Image: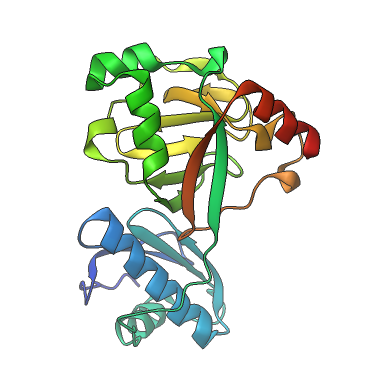
Amino acid sequence: MIYHMKAFKHIKHIAYAGMDGLILYFAGEIGPANQRIQQYMQAISYDKPDWLKSLIPSYDTLLVCFDCFKVDSHFVYQYLANLEIESSFTSDSSHHHIPVWYDCPQTSDFEQIKNQTGLEKNEVIELHTAYTLQVFAVGFAPGFAYMGELVDELVCPRLATPRKQVPQGAVAIAEKQAAIYPFSSPGGWNLIGLCPWYHNLSDPGDLPEFSVGDRVSFYSVNEKQYGEIVNDK
């Protein structure tokens, strides 16, 4: 039976995801909405309901997967609607300090970024390294972390025509987001550098681990320092 699920608290909409999932859509701007997602995840994980299979967060949504042989969607809805959410939460997030070789010739879209933003290369690098970003979601490919939000000055659209191949470890920006391509793949983001952590990685198990809520800071290295980091891995 399909039940009508009214929105509640910080949730603006709830949708079914098959027989064993509910998607919670959170209200508000991306930053506050993502923080509320983490609050819900912490509260549910602390409670440890025996019907819970997994929690999958994104920018402003949380997918709650449950064991449909133990409970139904109406039960889970009632559980979520009555869940006590703390206004603050204890975060065990990590802070990643990520080296970037901004002068890599294979990852240089600075001219088209200038056409979109008016910023020179040195200004793009200065802004990209000046602020701490947050991991809002992990997806698209194993280890691909969506980080944000970039300052307004750096905002530029995705490429009109995506590349067929982006170099492994390419550091990129699009809209208000930043990311690193963990493996060579098609992609439509603007490339601004190369991260040595990903040099010749082939096993997804060796990828840097990013979790929703982690903080990220970028810093500049030259070609020699890039090679030294690669050799020290």
Residue under the point 79% across and 38% down:
232
Q: Indicate left or right for 6 with 164 as reference.
A: left
Quadrant of res 113? top left
Q: What is the quadrant of the N terminus in the image?
A: bottom left
Q: Looking at the picture, does residue 40 appear above or below residue 106?
A: below
Q: Indicate left or right for 25 with 91 as reference.
A: left
Closer to the camera, 25 or 217? 217
Residue under the point 37% across and 46% down:
131
**Residue 195: x %, y % from top left:** 60, 32
Residue under the point 24% across and 19% down:
116
**Residue 89: x %, y % from top left:** 40, 79
Disc tally is: 0
Closer to the camera, 27 or 181? 181
Residue 140 visible here: yes
**Residue 167: x %, y % from top left:** 60, 21
Q: Indicate left or right for 200 with 209 as reference.
A: right
Quadrant of res 84? bottom left
